[in-house]
């Protein structure tokens, strides 16, 4: 069985509805109160509205760089999902703990917090840094402010472990992501006079078709990177809106698409090719009506993670875990930002599986919590020996 303190903390964390759209300050207050009851001071790094915050704390000597344990406190919504158990209460059953965020990723945070008393009691010769963020689920937004703050610190962490669910295997790579909104402005008229208007839906369809051909080209021509279920960059259109009635030529259509790129691919270069195609269509539209336009706005963007297999951090973290498996993950993390912006060697390793993340009746296995507890115990031992 997992440590009762871990489960108590997990129960508390799941009890806070920290869907990305909501404030996480109540959760932060609980965590800070817990840390300070063990004599650990922590710093908040707020968002612009002061409604959400990151937390940063260092345990152990402050005059040297240490190991950062990083996790996000926000969760995806439960809206539209059919839960058979309460989403914001921990339910223990059949060796599993159910609740929103149990695996993604309050389980990891609970294990780390439950080990704080030992971290404090041991004289650590190398510090452990805690970095808990907000707004990860909407595009790794919140952690950027923490990264800005860390950039000004005299000492940046030497190593970063992102505790996203990997079944405790050490993951060195994930793809980057660039998401954009395309807005097509056409010219409306009665559908009986269609050739006099500019049909925004038709132009959007041509743009979406171009993206689909790009996706197929990536599949057949690459570039490729082994280690992924899909070993090439993907391009996908996710939503589309346009038109008001069948007898009106639509003057508006917008859609969202994303590129998930492997390390060898620059998504901005692909975006530029897309823009060139859009420019050609735009001229065609403007020849009919000058007010027509195609706008492309990036909505979210984060870099991929690509840590070398022979990097020191990989051997270091592999020594701490029981799971010898290797492989990349199919979701993004804040690891790419820590690695690219701050230059901190980073891997992903955490309890649970993303098979259960973002789904109704999300759960984490007790055995995964226990493996993560053993992992953190080994880390403490290594940093205090
Ligand atoms: Zn996550």
Image: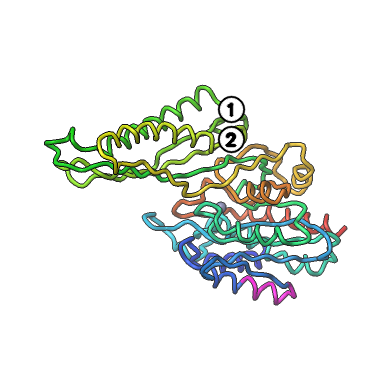
Q: Main secondary structure of the magenta part?
A: helix
Q: Work out how far the residue at label 1 is from the one at label 2, CA to CA, in angstroms.
A: 8 Å
Label 2 crowding class (10 Å Cα cut-off): few <14, some 14-19, many 20+? many
* Residue 222 in the figure: left or right of residue 196: right
Q: Secondary structure at mark 1?
A: loop
Residue 149 sits above or below residue 218 on the image: below
Q: Residue at x 33, y 37 (%)?
A: 204
Q: Residue furthest top?
A: 220
Q: Which residue is mark 2?
A: 262
Query: Is 255 or 80 nearer to us in this picture?
Result: 255
x, y (%) of residue 263? 62, 36
Q: Residue at x 62, y 57 (%)?
A: 71
Displayed quadrant of residue 231? top right
Q: Residue at x 61, y 51 (%)?
A: 334
x, y (%) of residue 76? 47, 56
Can see residue 225? yes
Displayed quadrant of residue 213? top left
Label 1 crowding class (10 Å Cα cut-off): few <14, some 14-19, many 20+? some
Query: Is 287 or 307 nearer to us in this picture?
Result: 287
Query: Is 227 or 46 nearer to us in this picture?
Result: 46
* Residue 107 in the figure: left or right of residue 59: left
Residue range highlighted in magenta: 31-40
Q: Which residue is mark 1?
A: 224
x, y (%) of residue 154? 78, 61
Q: Earlier in the sequence, mark 1 or mark 2?
A: 1
């Amino acid at each position: 069985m997992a440590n009762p303190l871990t489960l108590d903390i997990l129960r508390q964390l799941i009890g806070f509805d920290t869907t990305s759209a909501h404030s996480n300050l109540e959760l932060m207050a609980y965590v800070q109160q817990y840390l300070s009851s063990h004599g650990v001071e922590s710093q908040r790094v707020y968002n612009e509205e002061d409604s959400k915050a990151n937390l940063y704390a260092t345990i152990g000597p402050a005059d040297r760089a240490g190991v950062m344990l990083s996790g996000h406190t926000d969760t995806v919504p439960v809206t539209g999902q059919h839960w058979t158990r309460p989403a914001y209460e921990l339910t223990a059953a059949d060796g599993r703990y159910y609740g929103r965020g149990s695996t993604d990723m309050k389980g990891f945070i609970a294990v780390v917090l439950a080990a704080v008393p030992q971290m404090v009691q041991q004289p650590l010769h190398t510090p452990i840094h805690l970095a808990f963020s907000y707004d990860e689920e909407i595009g790794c937004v919140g952690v950027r402010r923490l990264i800005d703050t860390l950039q000004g610190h005299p000492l940046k962490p030497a190593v970063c472990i992102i505790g996203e669910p990997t079944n405790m295997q050490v993951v060195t790579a994930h793809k980057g992501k660039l998401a954009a909104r395309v807005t097509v402005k056409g010219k409306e008229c009665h559908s009986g006079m269609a050739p006099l208007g500019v049909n925004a839906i038709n132009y959007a369809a041509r743009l979406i078709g171009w993206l689909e051909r790009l996706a197929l080209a990536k599949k057949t021509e690459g570039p490729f990177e082994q280690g992924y279920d899909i070993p090439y960059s993907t391009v996908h259109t996710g939503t589309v809106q346009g038109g008001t009635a069948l007898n009106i030529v639509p003057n508006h259509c917008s859609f969202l698409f994303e590129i998930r790129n492997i390390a060898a691919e620059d998504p901005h270069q692909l975006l530029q090719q897309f823009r060139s195609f859009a420019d050609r269509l735009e001229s065609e539209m403007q020849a009919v009506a000058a007010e027509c336009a195609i706008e492309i706005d990036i909505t979210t963007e984060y870099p991929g993670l690509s840590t070398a297999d022979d990097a020191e951090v990989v051997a270091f973290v592999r020594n701490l875990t029981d799971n010898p498996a290797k492989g990349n993950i199919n979701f993004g993390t804040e690891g790419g930002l820590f690695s690219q912006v701050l230059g901190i060697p980073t891997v992903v390793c955490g309890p649970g599986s993303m098979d259960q993340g973002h789904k109704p009746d999300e759960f984490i296995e007790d055995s995964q919590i226990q493996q993560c507890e053993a992992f953190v115990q080994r880390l403490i031992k290594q940093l205090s020996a």
